[in-house]
Amino acid sequence: MIQSRTTRNFRRLFSNLPRDVRAEAQRAYRKFQSDPSYPSLHFKQREGEDEIYSVRIWLDHRALRLALLR
């Protein structure tokens, strides 16, 4: 399973999203946790960015993930 953490700023911004977007983001996150390569998520590395990845929530909403290597 993929480990993830959120920041205080993320939680604040997330709580300001419309309820339907938050619900869809939570569904997408559950899919991502069980299968990061799930086709509808379009999980991919951002062009020109070594540590930033994006995942589709809806057509006009994406989440960014910063990969922290240890």
Image: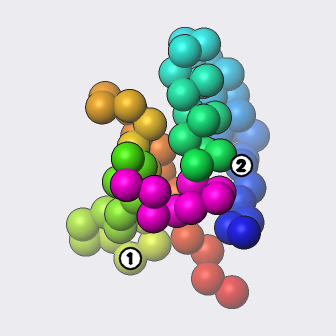
- Residue 13 visible? The answer is no
Magenta-colored stretch includes residue 17: no
Asked if residue 56 lies left or right of residue 26, the reply is left
Q: What's the amino acid at mark 2?
A: Thr
- Please tell me which residue is depicted at 56% across the width and 61% down the height of the picture: 35
Residue position for label 2: 6
What SS does tag 1 mark? loop
Residue position for label 1: 50
What SS does tag 2 mark? loop
Q: Earlier in the sequence, mark 1 or mark 2?
A: 2
- Residue 29 visible? The answer is yes
Asked if residue 49 lies left or right of residue 19, the reply is left
Front in this rendered view, residue 10 or 34: 34
- Please tell me which residue is depicted at 61% across the width and 82% down the height of the picture: 69
* Residue 3: quadrant of the picture: bottom right
Most extreme residue toward the left, as rendered?
47
Front in this rendered view, residue 15 or 35: 35
Question: What is the x, y in percent for residue 46?
Answer: 31, 63
- Please tell me which residue is depicted at 38% across the width and 31% down the height of the picture: 58
Quadrant for the C terminus, please: bottom right
Q: What's the amino acid at mark 1?
A: Asp
Q: Which residues are magenta?
A: 32-39
Quadrant for the N terminus, please: bottom right
